[in-house]
Amino acid sequence: MHVEKIWETHQKVLEYAKKRHPKLYVITPPNYRSLGILPYSYRKFKEDVAKKYKELKEFCRMELHVHLNISPRFRSSDFRTKEKVIKDSFHFLEGIGVHPKEVVFGAYIWDEDCERAARRLGLKIIWPHFHIYDWWL
């Protein structure tokens, strides 16, 4: 399941995770910030998401979900810019005790730079995969 709106879906995702113990591909605060999509201040958002993901991790396997190339700004950005978002997202999860081994790129869009950054972190790119979103619950 892709978790893209945890600030709205946390309770439903938590209930689902307790019953099903799924694999969740989660977007992290550094990725939301890079896209300019934050429902409120970054510091508070990061704290809130960390708290929600820490609670969820007890009932599921969490992996990385990164949206990069949906933004025209990122399509033309260099390797270091893309790598920073992927790396910051990876380290956010590690900081809450989640050690991702896989990454799913959003909208099925990624490039060689994304692949290289994922490889450097030891992440396996999952493709193809079935989309189920948290906001469908």
Image (tube, rainbow, N blue to C red):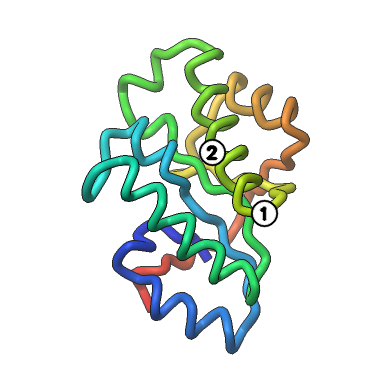
Quarter of the view holding residue 3: bottom left
Horizontal relation, residue 123 to residue 74: left or right: right
Which residue shows up at 46% across the image and 44% down it? 106
Q: Amino acid at mark 1?
A: Val
Q: Are marks 2 and 1 in contact (CB under 8 Å)?
A: no
Q: Amino acid at mark 2?
A: Ser
The single residue placed furthest to the left in the displayed view is 40
Quarter of the view holding residue 17: bottom right
Q: Label 2, secondary structure: give it.
A: helix
Horizontal relation, residue 39 to residue 34: left or right: left
Q: Which residue is mark 2?
A: 89
Query: Residue 120 at what x, y percent from top left?
Result: 74, 25
The number of callouts visible is 2
Horizontal relation, residue 27 to residue 116: left or right: left
Query: Residue 58 at what x, y percent from top left?
Result: 65, 73
Query: Residue 57 at what x, y percent from top left?
Result: 62, 67
Query: Residue 108 at what x, y percent from top left?
Result: 50, 42
Q: Which residue is mark 1?
A: 98
Image quadrant occupied by the C terminus: bottom left
Crowd around label 2: few <14 · some 14–19 · many ≥20 (10 Å): many
The single residue placed furthest to the bottom in the displayed view is 19
Q: Is residue 86 above or below residue 11?
A: above
Q: For the residues marked 2 and 1, what is the alpha-carbon distance in whole angstroms?
A: 11 Å
In this view, the residue in front, 57 or 12, is: 57
Horizontal relation, residue 5 to residue 56: left or right: left
Dot placed on the residue nearer the N-terminal end, 2 or 1: 2
Which residue shows up at 40% across the image and 47% down it? 46
Which residue shows up at 67% across the image and 54% down it? 98
Crowd around label 1: few <14 · some 14–19 · many ≥20 (10 Å): some
Which residue shows up at 58% across the image and 85% down it? 18
Q: Label 1, secondary structure: give it.
A: loop
